[in-house]
Amino acid sequence: ATEVIDISHFLPLAFGHRFGHAERRDGPRKLLLIDDQAFFRNMLGPILTAAGYAVTSAAGAADALARIRSGERFEVVVTDLDMPDMTGFELAQTLQNDPITAGMPVIGLTPIDSPDLAHCARQVGIRDCVAKFDRSGLIAALQSNGLAVGQAA
């Protein structure tokens, strides 16, 4: 048996405004989290929610594009780069080619931290790459790209 602790409850208690409770005047930033593996969506979703983001999860690029094309609007996309139906690279290129989503910031999730992968990602419009297990690195990447909760868009 394993107990599961909901860290999204405890992070704001421990760190206050650094992990939530510091929303912009018009509400939290809307973030689309895309990963074909439920494990990573379930691991990162609560972290991002605790950091103050309004997180919507998608099980793949097709699901994410369907949400966007149906009219849902997001301020940032965090996507796995290695997905079976459409890679994160292809998704980022698709978003960049669409006038509605052309300026939408994309952060890539990688299995390992690799400068070569990050270089390739930047060529298709991905602003930053973070290893999937680097939760604090993901928050830092969002902040360093001007996407922190509490910052103007």
Image (cartoon, helix red, strand yellow):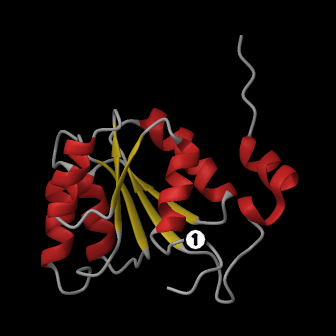
Q: Residue at x 74, y 73 (%)?
A: 22
Secondary structure under tag 1 reads: loop
Q: Residue at x 72, y 48 (%)?
A: 8
> Mark 1 = which residue?
148
Label 1 CA crowd tier, 10 Å (few <14, some 14–19, many 20+): many
Q: Quadrant of residue 1?
A: top right
- Depth check: 63 or 104 in front? 104
What x and y, as percent, mark residue 108? 33, 52
Residue type marked 1: Ala
Q: Residue at x 55, y 50 (%)?
A: 45
State left or right for residue 141 relative to residue 150: left
Q: Residue at x 28, y 81 (%)?
A: 103
- 102 up-or-down from 127: above or below: below
State left or right for residue 82 relative to residue 139: left
- Depth check: 153 or 63 in front? 153
Q: Quadrant of residue 128?
A: bottom left
What x and y, as percent, mark residue 87? 18, 48
What x and y, as percent, mark residue 66? 26, 66
What x and y, as percent, mark residue 118? 26, 50
